[in-house]
Amino acid sequence: MRAFLVVPALAATLLSGCSEAQTTQAESSALATTTGPAAPAGKQGKQGKKGKKDKAADIANLTEVGKMKEVPESSGLALTGENGTFYTHGDDGNPPVLFKIDTKGKVLARIDVPAKSHDWESVTRDNVGNLYIGDVGNNNNDRRNLVLLRLNPLNPQIVQEIHLKYPDQTEFPPKKKDRNFDCEATLWHDGQVYLFTKDRGRGETSKVYTVPDQPGTYTAKLLTKLAIPGQVTDAALSPDGRRLVLLGREEMFVLEGENLATILKAPPRQISLKGAGQTEGAVFTSDQTLYISTEQGRLYTYQFE
């Protein structure tokens, strides 16, 4: 794997603080306790409608717990602050709507967001309940209107905007091999929103940028580059702040350390999720339990040992 560097001055700022996952430690633990095993073991290895074996059933530690029949192409997951519920949203081309769902994928509420949806790709939550919707999908690497939408679900009519640009992008679009300015993964942590790129060029590096969580217009800071041999679709940090998951399509990359600063220096461990579908959303509910959503509407838990 290719080595990467962390900018020391910036990395030092990560050594303290709390993440989205850490600020919801109590509610996350309660969620993991109340949901329990989400699917009986007898359903493992069941046959599909056409007699084909469900490949996802053979993935160790992965359990399908529900289906999001009313959510079009789930592309992100975030905690709500209430036990047993999440926020999710549709992918590019869908209306600007947040869905509140339960642990089985049932829609409990729809929140219309008075903002455009160019290409919503992620959602993350801070320690006081604000959501940050990542309208930063950039398939062709030619967008100049990248924005994070900040809102509180209790008053969704007030939407604040965090506009951003990348410091190292000078061409729109760049040459195909250099197209690494698409982003489908964001994570709030200690007053910053982290953006992890989806490498559409060489497919081997995820760049990590940060912007403040306050409304405004910013040039994002390039914090580091991670040797990720895949295309990142979401990011999740465990409540204890020691495990970072970068989700990919039918795979995930796990990095571990004492805190986010050391995590970003750790080598990634690749875990195959082949057969699970187009995995696009991820969020921890406890240090061991990760929820994963797919564009096809499946909802899974992955249990770390």
Image (cartoon, helix red, strand yellow):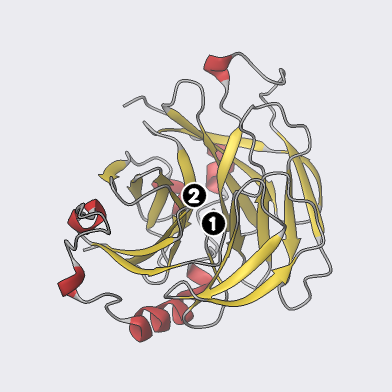
249 up-or-down from 192: above or below: above
Q: In this view, does 74 lie to the left or right of 303?
A: right
- Count of marks, rendered view: 2
The quarter holding residue 284 reads: bottom left
Task: Estimate the x, y position of residue 218 in percent, counting from the top left.
Answer: 77, 41
Q: Which residue is drawn at 32% across and 38% down?
A: 267
Residue bearing mark 1:
76
Query: Secondary structure beneath disc 1?
Result: loop
- The residue carrying pointer 2 sits among few (fewer than 14), some (14 to 19) or many (20 or more) residues within 10 Å by Cα, namely many
- The residue carrying pointer 1 sits among few (fewer than 14), some (14 to 19) or many (20 or more) residues within 10 Å by Cα, namely many
Residues 3 and 123: in front is 123
Q: Is residue 227 left or right of residue 121?
A: left
Residue bearing mark 2:
234
Q: Do the residues labelled 2 and 1 touch (CB within 8 Å)?
A: yes
Three-letter code, disc 1:
Gly
- Mark closest to the chain's N terminus, 2 or 1: 1
